[in-house]
Image (cartoon, coloured by chain):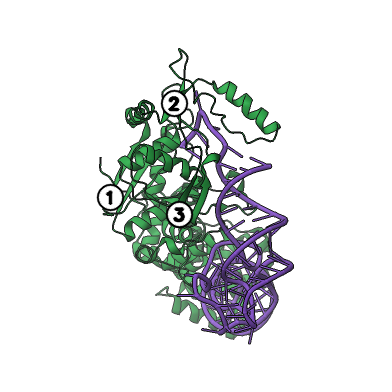
Amino acid sequence: MTSNKGGSVVRVRFAPSPTGHLHIGGARTALFNWLFAKHHRGKFILRIEDTDRSRSTEEFIESIIEAMKWLGLDWDEGPFRQTDRMDIYRAYAHKLLEEGKAYRCYCTPEELEQRRQEAMKEGRPPRYDRRCREISGILNKPFAIRFKMPLHGETVVDDLVKGPVTFKNSEIEDLVILRSDGTPTYNFCVVVDDFEMAITHVIRGEDHLNNTPKQIHIYHALGMDVPKFAHIPMILGTDKARLSKRHGATAVLSYRDEGYLPDAIVNFLARLGWSYGDKEIFTREELISLFNLEQVGKANAIFNAEKLLWLNSEYIKMTPEEELFSLVKPFLIKENYLREDANIELSWAAKAIRSLKERCRTLKELAHAMRYYLLDSVEIDPKAKEKYINPKSAGLIEELIEKLSCLEEFTQDRIEKIFIDIVNEKKIKLGDIAQPVRVAITGNTVSPGIYEVLEIVGKEKTLKRLRRIIDAH
RNA sequence: GGUCCCAUCGUCUAGCCAGGUCUAGGACGUAGCCCUCUCAAGGCUAAAACACGGGUUCGAAUCCCGUUGGGACCGCCA
């Protein structure tokens, strides 16, 4: 295929291995690649690294794709799958073998493992001792193909984030590029694919920095141009260990299920390790135009779930009510607050959501808060009832029922007038009547403004609930 | 153990490359106050950091060295 010469169009890729769901760390790597591609009007390629057949599954491939789509990280080419490209890797591996740049290794995995253990025990580096490198001729035994690393000199990775990083060649081992079963290994596939796909910039996690000199030598041996590298820091859990399952939710899709907005996740991930002055909230367009590798920090970042929650609440506040309604709908249905075939008037739904959106940090919370608008009757919290429903408040409610019944237009303004009348007549505080009513209508002591709530709940349900609470009392 | 990376409030970070304007800025979270029918939202205020030790310099968060701490990698895993 093409060479990368000429510095033409930017081509980057995200290359997850489908051995799990797309997690927060992977998503950020994908995002940085996507942003970089968009910023430079380049191409973003999705490649599935599934050469580990025992751990890769179709389910994870689908899940990763679903997560990418949900986040809005669309790709221009792919998804390519390494398992579809085995012949290509094999051909390159044998080419290296023929050219004497690689050699047959007859050591068995068991032998290697044993030697590794011994080396560790004796405090030696657990590295392959190159014992098969000098074997001449071909033995009639199963073999893996190993790459001949240079024995001397050093290799510099000119990293776009870390700066120049120097490795001694003597520290780099002769890695296996083709296993004895004929399948290629990661470090080899990456090089072949990145070349074949004309990748110009490899943006990936810092955990790959130590692999980079190995890959550079493979590029050289194959006569390929080396792309530019950018190794971005890791995302850690609160205990500073690499983010993993035990830190709670790490799968991107679990955030979808918890009611997070993809834009909030994207914004949050972008600010983890990258910044633009004091700016915290970015639209996608801003992210695309402002993103650059120079502003990517060098230090690892700890995943701060609280800040994500805050950002999500900001995005909920920014989202128009109608749109929010279609977003909460699945949650409402799931919680049985709404039937799938229910016919809800959009203007009413918008009003309901407007009253709640700045009180909720996730769609799930929003759905839950909407229950007293949607359900026919509400469950009353016994503690709230005990505190606010008593003979005195029941009397006030009685009076309220009478006045509200006469109301032609059941609107916030009219309702407020009635409350104020009662407060003035009875010489009570607004809270003396507002709280009992709130308990009757919402079942709880917390809600948006009470007049607003009554209007949204509507005259019929309001009166029914008010009666019910004093009757039950 | 070896190699590599990193180090500013509890957390994300600005500042560092081009040393003085930093009594170190913003944001999340926390605390207090205001607003108030509850809860939020909003407004105001507060506590909170240059890991440590040496240099270089008139002057260092910023440059250099070391120490310590954290992370990553050392597979016929990716």
Q: How many marks?
A: 3
User: How many C-alpha atoms fall within 10 Å of the one at disc 3: few (<14), some, or many (≥20)?
Assistant: some
Label 2 sits on a secondary structure element that is: strand
Does residue A43 show up? Answer: yes
Circle 2: residue type: Tyr
**Image-based side of A231 in relation to A9, left or right:** right
Nearest to the observer: residue A335 or residue A252: A252
Say if residue A258 shows up in the picture: no
- Left/right of residue A34 with respect to residue A19 in the rendered view: left
**Secondary structure beneath disc 3?**
strand
Q: Residues within 10 Å of mark 1 (few under 14, many from 20)?
A: few
Q: Where does residue A419 sit, x and y in percent of width and height?
A: 53, 79
Q: Position of residue A72 (x, y in %)?
A: 36, 53
Q: Which residue is mark 1?
A: A5
Q: Amino acid at mark 1?
A: Lys
Q: Position of residue B6 (x, y in %)?
A: 57, 59
Rendered colour, chain A = green
Residue at the top extreme of this rendering: A140
Indicate the secondary structure of the residue bearing disc 1.
Answer: loop
| Residue of label 2 | A103
Q: Cα distance, mark 1 to mark 3?
A: 19 Å
